[in-house]
Image: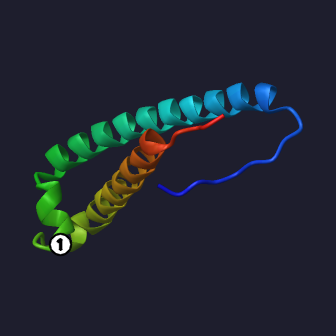
Amino acid sequence: MEKIEISTPEPDRVLPVLQDAVERQKRLVSQSLARTEDRIRKMAAHLQVAPERLMAGEVPHPEEKDMELLELEGELELHRHLRDQLEILERLKLCP
């Protein structure tokens, strides 16, 4: 595991602030992930499409559904990004 070093004249005061910031970011990302998952479920049900098949390029894009399918693809990409961010935050360890 790589380390990142932060220099500060007051490490005892900075560490709790950093820990709080990391925990707050985890909560925000988790909440965003839950909202994104909800939108994906609703959109996929409305469009009657399996998200996995859509991302694999197996779903045709008829003109009347094209914009909605693109929006769903965007939500799926956002979901992947948020999941990656949360994994990084979960592995993060602050060392005094």
Q: Which residue is mark 1?
A: 62
Determine whether, in the image, residue 54 is placed left or right of residue 35: left
Q: Amino acid at mark 1?
A: Pro
SS assignment at label 1: loop
Determine whether, in the image, residue 31 is placed left or right of residue 96: left
Horizontal and vertical percent for residue 62? 17, 72
* Residue depicted at x 10% and y 51%: 48
Front one among 25 and 62: 25
Front one among 22 and 81: 22
Q: Residue furthest right?
A: 9
Horizontal and vertical percent for residue 5? 70, 51
* Quarter containing the C terminus: top right
Could you classify mark 1 by the number of other residues whose Cα lies within 10 Å: few (under 14), some (14-19), or many (20 or more)? Answer: few
Front one among 86 and 56: 86
Front one among 3 and 69: 3
* Residue depicted at x 39% and y 53%: 84
Determine whether, in the image, residue 68 is placed left or right of residue 58: right
Horizontal and vertical percent for residue 63? 23, 73
* Residue depicted at x 51% and y 34%: 28
Determine whether, in the image, residue 94 is placed left or right of residue 38: right
Query: Image quadrant of residue 21?
Result: top right
